[in-house]
Amino acid sequence: MHSRRSLWELHIAVLLFGGTALFAKLIPLSALDMTVLRCLIAAVTLAVVVKASKGRLRLGSLREYAVALLLGAVVSLHWVTYFASMQVSTVAVGMIAFFTYPVMAVLLEPLIKRQLPQRRDLAAAVMVLIGIVMIVPDTNLGNSTTKGVALGIFSALLFTIRNLLHKHQFSHHSGPKAMFYQCLVAMIVLAPFQSQAALSMPAWGWGLLVILGIGFTAAPHALLAQALGNLKVKSVALISCLQPIYASVLAALVLHEIPNWRTLVGGALVVSAAVFETLAARSQKP
């Protein structure tokens, strides 16, 4: 019973994560302005969640605060480039480019341990490369699709660095607490560069920001943390691979963005590589 409930919680969390992409097109703000306000709303919400669960927000040492600062700085750039990739191209293109991160992770993590990537990982990387080449119409960054792919891949690299840093230095903290610090630091890092555009934004734009910060940032992270307690890590990783599909379907329904055949084929290759790596990595004995 608990596993079935956790499975639903996980699917809802992944659907919400995929839905964040829509706000890049719906909220009339730049990627940077949107990220600052999103982080503010999410940080306040996550602080309430931690306190409501009788947790404490303080960290244990100055070293942990330094790690939180580094994590937040990386996350700030990740979110700005994540939203920007979809603003200059489409949700499907930006999300597919971003989802190169599972393969980046399996290529970079062995290097941290001073090991060489395995052949299957290199094969998955080649599959991802072919998928990205299918999406990109030309190498000119003046092309909106090419620019979206470039920003999405850079966002994926930042997300990979964040995940590896979190895994090796910050994973002993709960999901809501860890995300509270990352949202807080990201807001502080980006706030000096924020424009005044939000002051003239209509009320419906602020309403969407609140929905993004609470319903599509704080809520899915809380659901994900809850689901992780009752599901296998492999199940979580595999279902997370549905995120580009959820995002593309939502974009088609809400924004009427219909991917072309090149995006569909390239996306299928990228997502297939992510699924392949997830299955291969989790089937290995520790």
Image (tube, rainbow, N blue to C red):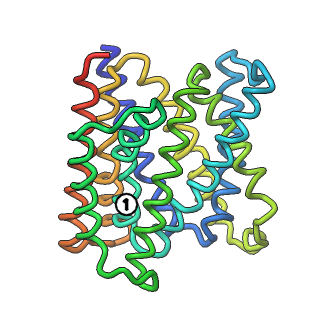
Quadrant for the N terminus, please: top left
In this picture, residue 251 sits left or right of residue 186: left
* Residue at the disc numbered 1: 97
In this picture, residue 41 sits left or right of residue 28: right
Question: Can you give x and y, in whole percent of width and height, for residue 286 in the image?
Answer: 32, 16
Out of 89 and 130, give the one closest to the viewer.
Answer: 130
Question: Can you give x and y, in whole percent of width and height, for residue 19 in the image?
Answer: 43, 53
Residue occupying image coordinates x 52% and y 29%: 167
Q: Few, some or many C-alpha atoms within 10 Å of disc 1 (few <14, some 14-19, many ≥20)?
A: many
Figure quadrant of residue 276: top left
In this picture, residue 160 sits left or right of residue 102: right
Out of 128 and 115, give the one closest to the viewer.
Answer: 115
Residue occupying image coordinates x 33% and y 53%: 244
Question: Can you give x and y, in whole percent of width and height, for residue 143 in the image?
Answer: 41, 84
- Could you tell me the amino acid type at mark 1? Ala
Residue 106, above or below 94? above
Residue occupying image coordinates x 60% and y 66%: 31
Figure quadrant of residue 233: top left
SS for tag 1? helix
Question: Can you give x and y, in whole percent of width and height, for residue 225 in the image?
Answer: 49, 26
